[in-house]
Image (cartoon, coloured by chain):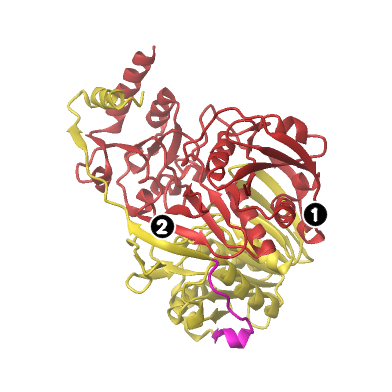
Chain colours: A yellow, B red
Amino acid sequence: MKIAVCVKQVPDSWAEKKMVNGLLDRENVDAVLNDLDEYAVEEALRIVEAHGGNEEGGPHTVTVISMGPERATEAIRKALSMGANGAILVSDTQLAGSDALTTSAVLAKVITDGGYDIVICGTESTDARMSVIPAMLSARLGWAQLTFASKVAVDPAGTASITRVTEAGVDEISAQFPVIISVVEKINEPRYPSFKGIMAAKKKTIEQKDLAAIGVAVQSSWSLVKDATPRPARDAGIKVTDEGSGGDSLVNFLAEKKLI
Amino acid sequence: MSTVLILADFSGDKASKTTAELATAAARIGAVTAVVLAGTGKGAALAATVNQGPISNVLIIESDDFALHGVPAAADALAQIIKDKSPAALLIASYAFGKEVAARVAVLTDSGIITDAVDVAADGSATQLVFGGSTTVHSQVSHGVPIITVRPNSIEADFSTSAPTVENGSAQISDAAKKSTISSSQPPVKGGRPELTEANIVVSGGRGTDGNFVPVEAFADSLGAAVGASRAATDAGWYPHSHQVGQTGKTVSPQLYVACGISGAIQHRAGMQTSKTIVVVNKDPEAPIFDIADFGVVGDLFNVLPQATAGINAKQG
């Protein structure tokens, strides 16, 4: 099986984020591998490990695919230290500030060229939080989508089944390869990279390509930010210390505000 | 007047209040056509419930492929309706299903997409609260038909009764949309409590519960509220992940949010700080969550919550 995992480098989810000129300021914050993508990497590794692992030269590989600035190699390195075999990073100044439609077009081309059986994504990035890339990839590639998976079962002969968990309930869905899978965070517990994994990752190849190399012409973003303003900080309100009637004062506050 | 499409949202076999919210937003742009995607023979009954909010037309598309193939089939149908009617915009509820349908429709119709709008203006531009509600953004689609997903519970719906005309249409579902097959579907397990993202009141528990959510749940029930949890609580296995509020969980924006034993790291605030009123119960007077609270009680939730629960139950007799 050839498995690809799409990952994104995002600002640390604990960091304050700001907009500059209609785009997220990515320069001045710590950047990390998107939390939710770690579950995707972990799931890919578990799938190959259940069928003999992804040793070099073996039948199964896990490739990390990302689009982003050159600095994204840091986040990719983390996925490699978890155990992925290698990575492809599409990096081009023309891609700065691109929308999900462009991102999905770029990723779709890299996926087509790689001839994968399975592509796994996190359900969303913690910066844009759109949850649209997996569905867009499925639509662009004409592949089956198996998204919002809390459980994945793969038969290397060519089928995958998932349990999809959303607000709408729980669905059991299956499809033939090739498939796009997205995973929710309850699916597994991502491993911490071992020291051996971190050392091995330093020797693994991150193939960097620009748009010309993958043969995609970029279009301008089809949704434009007109303005972005920080919302005023909320003022701290009333604070009381419970000396036996804290619950009652809480109820009185709710009654005053007509919330009960 | 131009036509604006909404994808009608249903709770069981009735149009949800989200449908009225979508219609209210869409009516600012043009005459609203609500699309009802239904199984064969089930469209008319569903369509009959789509009568709250400013809706001019209901368009029924029946196909068993919707239940069998889910998101891709729904997207195929909507993309065909867009090509047929050239609407001014398409508005869909911002749930997992709606966002994925919107994503595919955007690709199929070469259109720009905006997700998680909290407001939509007459010119089709949308307001979003990004980075955990810390920044307000106004965006506009610049190509194709604006595909906008609207966050439930953020638009004040006009619930006035309408008497839309009903039309039956058809759609061709492509082979590409049939590549995955749904073998079984279970509706969400509904406790007696409202859905987290739709609830007017949310009561959440965190590390301070020490794994005991009984007082949090009892307080939530006295208010008819949904129950949420911080990441610390869900990671510890104290409460299901599906109830996690925060950056990596659900984003909620209720009338009232009560945070119990939650310190208020950015992780959590990102999922709740656009709530209208925030009430906090926490033992630690230095907890950062007090900075955004309209009302805070410094105290042990195991004392404060039962007293508040009793107080509310007494008032509501």
Classed neighbour count for the residue bearing mark 1: other residues with Cα under 10 Å, few (<14), some (14–19), many (≥20): some
Which chain does tag 2 point to? B
In the rendered structure, find residue B173 and report the number of the disc placed on it. Answer: 1
> Is A75 situated left or right of A155 in this image?
left
Q: Is residue B78 above or below residue A27?
A: above
> Is B245 situated left or right of A43 in this image?
left
Residue B181: x %, y % from top left? 77, 52
User: Residue sitting at 60 percent across and 69 percent down?
Assistant: A104
Depth order, front residue of B6/B291: B6
In the rendered structure, find residue B305 and report the number of the disc placed on it. Answer: none
Which chain does tag 1 point to? B
Residue B60: x %, y % from top left? 75, 40
Name the residue that disc number 2 marks.
Answer: B137
User: Residue sitting at 44 percent across and 49 percent down?
Assistant: B235
Residue at the limit of the structure toward the bottom, as seen here:
A213
Position of the C terminus of chain A, as image quadrant, is top left
Instruction: Please give the range of residues in magenta.
Output: A206-222
Residue type marked 2: Val
Specify which label sits upstream in the sequence, 2 or 1.
2
Assign a secondary structure to mark 1. loop
Mark 2 against mark 1, which lies toward the viewer? 2
Please identify the quarter of the rendering in which residue A134 is found.
bottom right
Residue type marked 1: Ile
Assign a secondary structure to mark 2. strand
Q: Is residue A200 visible?
A: no
Q: Is residue B169 above or below residue B12?
A: below
Please identify the quarter of the rendering in which residue B215 is found.
top left
Depth order, front residue of B58/A167: B58
Residue at the limit of the structure toward the front, as seen here:
B1
Residue B40: x %, y % from top left? 82, 39
Look at the image and say whether residue A9 sits in the magenta stretch: no
Real-space CA distance between mark 2 and mark 1, rounded to the nearest whole angstrom = 36 Å
